[in-house]
Structures are given as structure tokens and as C-alpha cells.
Image (spheres, rainbow, N blue to C red):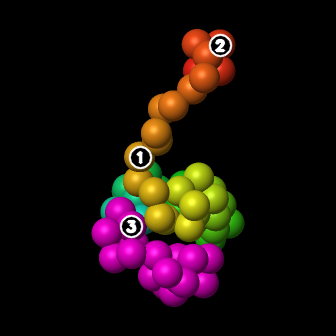
Amino acid sequence: MDMRIAILAASPDAPDPAIAGMLEARARLDRLGDDAATPRRIGHLIGQCAHESLHFSHDAENLFYTTAARIC
């Protein structure tokens, strides 16, 4: 699986630093062994990261919560 193509398929406007970070994450999965870097797991990783970062447009949480209870 070409990771760069998969990332751009999920998020065509993904910036280069985000792609580089995802490629590093893939390299770390590869070092864990064959069971860690399955195409399905990599697809889930890309999808989850794209979702959580608004298609790689944010790289940090704003941590703005209206109440302390919402932090939990």
C-alpha cells in the first residue's frame, strides 16, 4: 500500500508535514511486526487521524472547555 496515495485519497489537501508524520507512524507500525501494519489497520489509522484533525488541518487540541466536567 502506498501510504502517500492513501493519505491523499482520504484528505486531498493534506499538508506535507502531516503526510510526513503519517509516514513516520507507518514506519513505527512496521517495526512492531506484520500484525501491526495490516492494510486494514493502516486504513483505520489514516481515517481516524484525518477525522480527528479535520482532514489534517489542525495539529493541536484547543483545550477550550466550558466546564471542568467536560474535560473528563
Q: Which image quarter: residue 71?
A: top right
16 and 41: which is toward the camera: 16
Mark 1 element type: loop
30 and 16: which is toward the camera: 16
Could you tell me if residue 11 is visible in this image? yes
Report whether 1 appears left or right of 24. right
Which of marks 1 and 2 precedes in the sequence? 1
Q: Is residue 2 shown above or below 24?
A: below
Q: Is residue 38 shown above or below 71?
A: below
Report whether 4 appears left or right of 1. left
Amino acid on which the number 2 mark rests in the picture: Ala
Task: Please name the residue that numbered disc 2 is placed on.
Answer: 69
33 and 44: which is toward the camera: 44
Image quadrant in which the C terminus is located: top right
> In the image, which is nearer the foreground, mark 1 or mark 3?
1
Report the residue at 58% width, 13% height from top. Answer: 68
Q: Which image quarter: residue 9?
A: bottom right
Could you tell me if residue 26 is visible in this image? no
Task: Please name the residue that numbered disc 3 is placed on.
Answer: 18
The circle drawn on residue 60 is: 1
The circle drawn on residue 16 is: none
Mark 3 element type: helix
Q: Is residue 68 magenta?
A: no
Report the residue at 61% width, 16% height from top. Answer: 67
From mark 1 to mark 3, how far is it between C-alphas?
12 Å
Which of marks 3 and 1 precedes in the sequence? 3
Mark 2 element type: helix
| Magenta-tinted stretch | 2-21
